[in-house]
Image: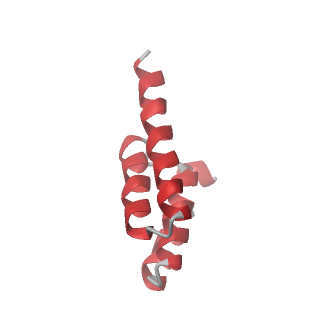
Amino acid sequence: MLYGLQVCAQNKFLYKGNEFYRNRQYEDAVKSYNRVLAENSNDTIAQFNIGNALYRDKREDEAIKAFEAMNHSPAAW
């Protein structure tokens, strides 16, 4: 049951991050996606979304690092 609650929390933060992204609140989106990663560091959707939000926020260097980090994630293998 605990796993179900963890997944539910992850989905909540992923959904909220997507809302922020749609509203061009990229910094808040990144914070929400990081909450997902705090629960599951291998969540490739959150990892990708962080890179995308950083890019849209004109933080290209950070975006590149976020995308590169995905290559080191076991879920990407």
| Left or right: 52, with 65 as reference point | right
Can you say whether 30 is above or below 43 in the image?
below
Residue 52 in view, yes or no: yes
Can you say whether 68 is above or below 16 in the image?
below
The residue at 35%/47% (across/down) is 38
The residue at 45%/84% (across/down) is 61
Q: Quadrant of the N terminus?
A: top left
Residue that protrudes farthest toward the front in the picture: 23
Residue 42 in view, yes or no: no
The percent coordinates of residue 23 (x first, y second) are 51, 65
Task: Compare residues 57 and 41 and report the one nearer the observer.
Answer: 57
Residue that protrudes farthest toward the top in the picture: 1
Residue that protrudes farthest toward the right in the picture: 77
Can you say whether 45 is above or below 51 in the image?
above
The percent coordinates of residue 62 (x first, y second) are 42, 78
How many marks overall? 0
Task: Compare residues 73 and 18 and report the one nearer the observer.
Answer: 18
| Left or right: 27, with 45 as reference point | left
Can you say whether 8 is above or below 52 in the image?
above
The percent coordinates of residue 44 (x first, y second) are 56, 53
The percent coordinates of residue 2 (x first, y second) are 40, 20
The residue at 52%/46% (across/down) is 15
| Left or right: 5, with 18 as reference point | left
